Image (tube, rainbow, N blue to C red):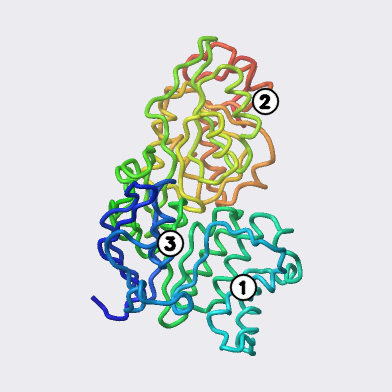
Amino acid sequence: MIAEAPMEARGVAVDLGGRRVLAGVDLDLHVGELLAIVGPNGSGKTTLLRTLLGLQPPAEGEVRLLGRPVRELRPAARARRAAWMPQEERPSENLTVEEYVGLARFPHIGAFGLEDASDRLAVDAAVAACDLEAFRNRGVLDLSGGERQRVLFARALAQASPVLVLDEPTSHLDMARQFETMAYLDRFRRERPGRAVLVSMHDLNLACRFADHLLWLSRGRVAAVDTPQASVTAERIYQVFGVETLVQRHDGQVVVFPARPATEPPPSSRGGRRVHVICGGGSGEQLLPALVGAGHSVSAGALHLLDSDEALAQELHVSVAVEAPFSPLSEPTRAENRRLMANADVVVVAPLALGPANIANLEDLLALGAGRQIVLMEGTPLAGRDFTGGQAGRVLRELAARGAVAVAGLAALLQLLREPAPPEGEPASGRSPVP
């Protein structure tokens, strides 16, 4: 055991309200490390962080900060070793942002309570790092929840302690601010000698993106401690969070998706057909709701996580093959999408933008062979949405040669789907193959 490790805990147990809420917790936070504690609400994450900082006395076990038992440290000495960012804090008076961030400097101010240049520099740097310059003279109580959370983060940074301990620092932030906050923490522990970060999180994808190790907390006990690559599995997520997920790995990164239905929903009792939609980037915005509303059994994909069509498919409970954001389609995702297409009576290709990341959708459709009707939705000319150097056009022409038909607009598509399926190799009634 390293004598001057930033933080260590051995056999920590905590009792609250006559009930044991933490038991047998061991933890090691190393220099330069970002360690994320993950677990559901009520698992004990906040209690553990408060105990590690000496804000909550343990019933059993010991915590050490920079080699010293926490119980032996006065509050100012603890604060010089570790800065604390709670989930929420509402001050009793409406201090300005600058004044509130400046409270972090009290552990460093001498006996006369006078600030010096280093205190002002620390506050200025923290305000700038959290993009709060425009709010410097605003009252903290006048800010939104997300803005106040950035102020709490700035206060923790201004404390200039070697250990940062943060409880759900991204919970009230939008996606861009979440990423900025985690990226800053990543730089903090990498670029500043002797620094370390301990953070509790709900967002497994953010934790996997930035943390060196994950400590899985379940019902007050440690379920596992390991790297994201080694510890994130669908089985462990179900064990800890009680939800079913899909876990994929891309270029060294772990990505967690919500679980997809194991089987396709049955066709509608109104005589709907099984329709798979190749869309993306909003090209399915009208298609997907209209098809579902018309009583068809709809699937979609492959779509990238965070794509607007992927979010819409989730909302509509449409089965969908999903890929990590900004990634080429992986073989597991392609295999799932081929399965969905193979189960369909009709595959509809929306007028989507086609690039290297999603051209595989058309290639897999072409390779799938006969057995389903293929419909190409007319829209923006292909020249304005083909970013594959002409590859997409070649695949679409081959689909046309095999009997794919073109329809102009949603009404025409819905009418086509109401008609009996044409004999294999023949175009739908009243329509011509794609030229």
Q: From what the image shows, is residue 82 above or below residue 324?
A: below
Left or right: residue 32 versus residue 231 is right
Q: Which residue is more in the foreground, 376 or 410?
A: 410
Disc 1 marks a residue whose amino acid type is: Ala
**Which residue corresponds to mark 3?**
50
Q: Which residue is mark 1?
A: 129
Q: Which residue is mark 2?
A: 410
Q: Is residue 334 left or right of residue 102?
A: left
User: The residue tagged with tag 3: helix, strand or loop?
Assistant: helix
What amino acid is at disc 2? Answer: Leu
Q: Position of residue 299 (x, y in %)?
A: 49, 29
> Label 1 near label 3: C-beta < 8 Å?
no
| Distance Cα–Cα, label 2 vs label 1 | 49 Å
Residue 289 position within the rendered picture, expressed as x and y whole percent measured from the top left:
62, 27
Viewer-proximal residue among 153 and 396? 153
Compared with 73, 252 (above or below) is above
Viewer-side label of 2, 1: 1
> Could you tell me residue 205's position as x and y percent?
45, 53
